[in-house]
Amino acid sequence: MEKTYNPGAIEGTWYKTWEENGWFAPSGSGKPYSIALPPPNVTGSLHMGHAFQQSIMDALIRYNRMKGNNTLWQVGTDHAGIATQMVVERKVQAEENKTRHDYGREAFTDKIWEWKAESGGNITRQMRRLGASADWDTERFTMDDGFYKAVQEVFIRLYEDDLIYRGKRLVNWDPKLHTAISDLEVENKEKQGNMWHLRYPLADGEKTGEGKDYIVVATTRPETMLGDTGVAVNPEDPRYKDLIGKDVVLPLVNRRIPIVGDEHADMEKGTGCVKITPAHDFNDNEVGKRCGLPMVNIMTLNGDIRDQAEAFNIDGSVNNDVDTTIPEQFRGMERFAARKAIVAVFDEAGLLEKIDDHTLMVPYGDRSGVVIEPLLTDQWFVKTAPLAEPAIKAVENGDIQFVPKQYENMYFSWMRDIQDWCISRQLWWGHRIPAWYDNEGNVYVARTEAEVREKNSLAADVELRQDDDVLDTWFSSGLWTFGTQGWPENTERLNTFHPTDVLVTGFDIIFFWVARMIMMTMHFMKNDSSSENPGTPQVPFKYVYVTGLIRDENGDKMSKSKGNVLDPLDMIDGIDLESLVTKRTGNMMQPQLAQKIEKRTRKAFAEGIAPHGTDALRYTLYSLASTGRDINWDMKRLEGYRNFCNKIWNAANYVLMNAEDQDCGQNGGEVELTLADKWIISKLQRVEAQVAKNIEDFRLDHASQNLYDFIWNEYCAWYLELSKPVLWDDGQDSPSVAGDRTSGVTDEALAKRKRGTRRTLVRVLEAIMRMAHPFMPFITEEIWQQIKPLAGVEGETIMTSAYPVADESKIDAQAEDDIEWLKGFITGIRNIRAEMNIGPSKPLDVILRNSSAEDLRRLEDNSAFLISLAKLSNLSALKDGEEAPMSATQLVGDMEVLVPMAGLIDKDKEMARLSREVEKLAKEVARFEGKLSNEKFVGKAPAAVIEKEKAKLEDARSAKARMEEQLEAIKAL
RNA sequence: AGUCGGUUAGCUCAGUUGGUUAGAGCGCUACGUUGACAUCGUAGAGGUCGCUAGUUCGAAUCUAGUACCGACUACCA
């Protein structure tokens, strides 16, 4: 093994070996266990969120594989409709100054396929760097033929089940991208705006209760008034109820529109009168439906004012009664310009009552960043209510469990108020909707045009045109767990690996994806006749492990525009400052931010980022994987875990130094286990049980903490140190371990003991490597390969070796207590050294007072350990009645450990130290006494608790008494 | 406005069914190159667990209220 830990040197080669040997594929035997990777954008690159979630998945996968399960990690990528199309559009614009329309649909989608071929491997290469042990042989892409067919099939079946319909409905329209988007893709942002109060004159000389010949409506979007088809007032409102059924004359367009009564109008709010624009506002649309108002669309797909409006009845049919003339001056005007112009005209006409400042939520497209317009268009929808019902039940009855549980609330609240899902997108990149139209406007849904003709007996000369739209990306990714396994064929793979076991994802896509996956899967996947409940729906996964979101060190979301994005690969490989600055400021959507970002980056990473290795990155991610919703990234944690890797490396180095070419008992031979050996073996069982439980409970943060603590603070800090006096024992001068105090112990006895210690060193390390492998795959494989012959272990790779299982019979409470005693003893001596400024290399004489038989036994058994670790020159117990010299004192239980002061110890310092101790103990005694003298406590608390308190009081009292005695004695000097 | 989450050491975070002297890492202080490791070791300092009230023998933990921060949903004519 190399002397220093160098992660870069081991990571690449091991991954290659694993992959080439096909060890990532399901073994074909054992209980099936599967995870479907949330498919990342095929042309994307790995960010911290991916790294986080994929590390978690890989740990679960590796753990289950080592447990002998038939383990599948299904991976693949998503075509990511809008995102990918936009990237290629921008690229074509920048490189060729062309738009997609210059190319045309077919040529442009070819262009996207080219881009996919070029950059599509990027993210999977990055996943490999992370150590992801995914089954690459069966990697899928959502636009692959097989998956494409599954998507099409789902559309057709839903249509046949009457769960998909097409209609002219109000949708969120992105005027820049020219597509409908779902309400989840809309980001509402708070903006400062205005509330314009407009006067609408009453028709036919009517007057309000106050005698005015107009009513006042308030609006934040005055331009929509061109499409008003009514004014609503509350039917209970005494001010206006008499006007219901009367008309107002819509200014500028001079259209008579009715005043209707509807509870949507709130008497308390605004003026109490609401202009109703059913074609441009979701609430108004509802009012329109209730009151039978027509819909007048005044906007183009660009969000400009139309030359002539379009009128529809509420059922979407064309309305020829409404005058659709738009005043000439506004025609073709951009929407925000039109807003200004319309307000100006109202003002001139004396119809502008007032303008208030107003804070409002404005909808923005999360991709385009432009203001979304509710717009009337023909779209396809999924009826979600019937699908939602079983999906809600599955979570209610525990077939699907969210971890942490509180996310179930989020799921329920959305599912119980679910809206129909607009699934058509006006894009070119995606799954084309399998619907055809004839010239009469009839719709036919089928797999192919030929099937349409056949099913509907259409003659060959009937002209058919396929729908131009594609499906929402989430529609296809909703089929991910079963579409990847060969559905609609009933494949062996589907039978084996569906339902998957756990979905690991962020809470931000519970609505987008998780909920829809559950609905889609439960509708299409039914248990077959071989199952316990044939015909019942199958869930896509049994657990949803919801992770937090990784933020930067200040708690800000990482984003390119903020320039605070950390690339997981930079943490692994390191990056110099200049490259980091270039990376963060290059290729920006808003170049004006570059300077600020550069400054920030230079400040935060003055030295660039050092390489830390994959194992350290992964371990850091696990340690942060608690139940919280936000995770603030901390480079210091990463450094700490790199040091941890280094610690492991060096510990292995020590073990190898002492075990290589030595007899480690791998070929049998008698062994003697020292107390230290028994202790570490016992502790190993405990940590094995803890780690396994925590993994099963999805608490990887706890599991990683258990391991860290055991490896660093038990194995390295104590056990390796305790192994030294055994291995260095030449049987000559020093007292030996295990009560073997005589010099000249036989070679055979020594060999037996050393063999035991070497065997323990090696075996425990080997078990640690297997235990840690799911978390830090590379360093564990590297060390395991070195150690396995010494441990007498067979196997080509640690990946498929057995995960350690705790053996209760090896838990040795006696050994644990003895070592705790030993630790207390040694720490006591070290404390005296530190407080008295006695160097660690100065050997000390130590005398024991008030030692029990148990203390003496322990002393007998462990003197070699004590002498070695506490650096003692002599160790003796005081007989009854024997006088002790003046000493510094430490307590180990009731036993006093004395270090004679002569020539070493400062009287004042020792007095000060003892005083502090006494003071501390006095407080404790007081607290316990208080508790125990409280009748209510003694009366009501369980006996065991009282006993515990009593014991603590006794200990504190006796410790205090001893310290006081000692203090007095020194004072008297 | 509603729902949910957070508030614990200087920083980043744990704390399982109420029973500890409230923990870890980083940082800090002092000392230290003894034969795995200075990416280290040893010893230490540091917290009235946001606030208030309650339940209880006992509350970081349960209840109610409250403050601040955050997310989401809705409303905003």
Image (cartoon, helix red, strand yellow):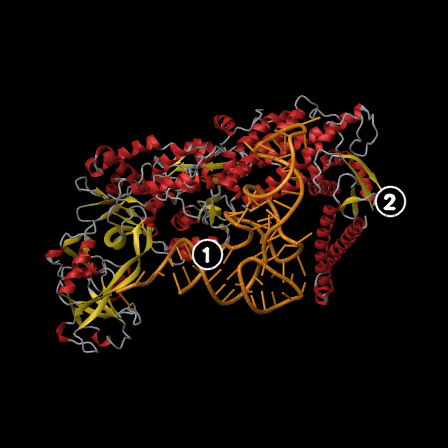
Q: Assess disc 1: are there few (<14), some (14-19) or many (≥20) residues with their C-alpha within 10 Å of its C-alpha.
A: few
User: How far apart, in angstroms, are the residues tagged by discs 1 and 2?
Assistant: 71 Å
Residue A495 in sight? no
Q: Amino acid at mark 2?
A: Glu
Q: Quadrant of residue B24?
A: top right
Quarter of the picture containing the N terminus of chain A is top right
**Which label belongs to residue A409?**
1
Three-letter code, disc 1: Asn
Q: Is residue A896 left or right of residue A695?
A: right
A749 sits left or right of A420 in the view: right
Q: Secondary structure at mark 1?
A: helix
Say which label, 1 or 2, has the lower sequence index: 1
Residue A297: give x, y in percent of width and height: 19, 56
Left or right: residue B30 versus residue B69 is: right
Q: Are marks 1 and 2 on the same chain?
A: yes
**SS state under label 2:** loop
Most extreme residue toward the top, as rendered?
Answer: A661
Whole-percent x and y of residue A735? 80, 31
Give the camera-side residue of A217 and A255.
A217
| A287, above or below A495, in the image | below
Give the percent coordinates (x, y) of residue A440.
Answer: 17, 49
Q: Which of A259 and A420 lies nearest the eye of the viewer?
A: A259
Q: Chain of mark 1?
A: A
Q: Which residue is mark 2?
A: A883
Q: Residues within 10 Å of mark 2 (few under 14, many from 20)?
A: few
Left or right: A691 in relation to A386: right
